[in-house]
Amino acid sequence: MQRKLTVVLALSSLVTAGAVGVATADAAELPVYGVKSSGLDQEQALRLQRAFGLKDVRRSEAGVVSFADEQRFQHLPTVDEGPGRPDEDGNETRQTGLDLDAIKRIRTIPTDEAAKRAQEGLRSAGVLPANATPTAQYTTFELSDVNGRTALSANLDTSVSYTFQLGGIPLEGEGANIRVSFDAQGVTSVSHAARTYSQAGTVKVNDLAYGAKLCQKYLGAEVKPEVGYVYVAAPLEEEVDRVEPSFRCAGRTAEGGAAQAITLPAAVGAELPQPGPGQEPRPEARFKIQAGGTQVGSEGTGNCADLPNTAANIGTFNSEASSHGIARAFSWLDGNAWESDFKDPAIAGGDDTNWADDVDLTYWQGHGSGTGFSFSGCSNHNDTKLSDTDARWGDHDVEWMSLFTCLILEDDTGGQTWAQRWGQAFRGLHQINSFTTVSYNSADHGGKFGNYMWRSPFLWWNNPMKVRDAWAQASIDTQPASVRWATMGPVTSSGALGNFDDYFWGKGPVGPDYTSTGVFWRISGVS
């Protein structure tokens, strides 16, 4: 599979591959913006809490404010069906069935009403930036079979996500993130991480034709690049006093594949990202950490696949696991990340029973598409693409396959639905966590995912989240409003049992391994 990257920016100045050979014009100037304020203070957080009638909100030292109702956040009506059979490691399990009648009775508010309520609440609290524009979408639950037929579809909530601009140019990043979700009763979650800005001069920037050449260099010759200007809003935890223009590099291959979007500085003379140190060559012995109890593993393609944040992101995931006492059985990067680690041994060259299927949760980052994920440019052991037809997960150990890559669970690809493509991968696997759209390269999605999943309670808050909720919240925190995250899993024919509400081991109830009967569920929502 070739490396690929896409995100089409809504800019009239978008340049595609056709302009790559065009000589660059003289450098123009674009505004630089200084930071006036960053995050919310305690009084603003309290006003936000009162405006939406919330029992409490959390405010970080950096001024990030968040709230998620533990009972109502992305609530799916289910029924406790009692103890299930122990898993392969002897862990106790709890069975959960769908309450189909209750799901059919769910009522959500219309998107226009949700957008109005969000606007009014944020404005009354005095925390709605002037450059923020709302977009409302539903979080959806679906049941579909391997013949592509949808048996049930329901909206779980209505979520309002905000996009931002500075002088007509998109402002994107973790420091430009406001989102409010509603069910029929009211607000179920709030995320608020934003800065205010004022113009602070200008800077000479390279033109978009130059940007297309630059993106082509980073993305590779097989990608038809698309580029536009963007301002990057760093996480509030990073102290910044100004933002300068960048290029948003995107594109597609001739096959139509897509992958994570990246940014490069646009200012004339700006320092471009350089490859960091890689891992030592993978030893022939292929060492593993041998440990009892639950284990996780991680792999990703970074510099060799033109994804500059992979090493940092995988590092945050590993650090969260270590800080919560969870053994890490392996962590392979770049040329040490192998397709064979995810392929079933029944297929020539497959070795997943020693790696991705030999732990409880595997976290992956790299380029991907609706039919698999790519090792192109990094390794060829024994292939450069793990395709959906290569995946047979859970017949050994793994419960949760978490794929931080693009389009894995998109609606349709090549005439096949998400259930048709990935249904056969469930051989005891509980969930695939991924995206239905393009995702954006991140340096801390993995750490946030791990923190939400493994965190320890403090008083009445900070309880660990269900695996699917942790994936959703980490994606909400790190991805722009254009990105839709998703989780899928199997449903039994008797009792409509499934792993809808799994926590990680030791953090809450976990369902048993189920053999697929050809029906699958998917929950997806907007970041």
Image (cartoon, grey):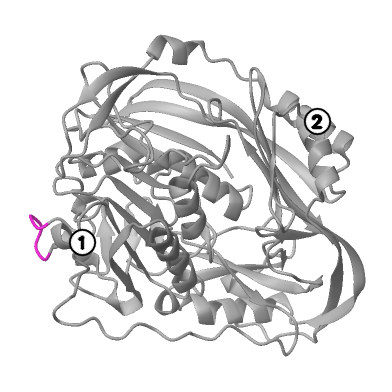
Quadrant of the rendered image containing residue 255: bottom left
Label total for image: 2
Q: Residue 138: horizontal and vertical position, in percent?
A: 58, 30
Q: Residue 100: horizontal and vertical position, in percent?
A: 39, 13
Q: Residue 108: horizontal and vertical position, in percent?
A: 61, 19
Q: Is residue 306 found inside the magenta-colored segment of the image?
A: no
Amino acid type, callout 1? Ala
Position of residue 163 relative to residue 218, above or below, is above
Main secondary-structure element of the magenta-colored stretch: loop
Q: Which residue is mark 1?
A: 291
Relative side of 504 to 40, left or right:
left
Q: Find residue 50 and name its label.
A: 2
Residue at the bottom extreme of this rendering? 269
Position of residue 173 relative to residue 110, above or below, is below
Q: Considering the image in quadrants, where does the N terminus appear?
A: bottom left
N-terminal of the two: label 1 or label 2? 2
Callout 2: SS: helix
Towards the viewer: 313 or 45: 45
Region of the chain picked out in magenta, as a range: 345-349
Position of residue 177 relative to residue 375, above or below, is above
Towards the viewer: 493 or 420: 493
Quadrant of the rendered image containing residue 208: bottom right
Residue 381 appearing in the image: yes
Residue 11 appearing in the image: no
Q: Badge 2, how many Cα within 10 Å: few under 14, some, many 20+?
A: some
Amino acid type, callout 2? Arg
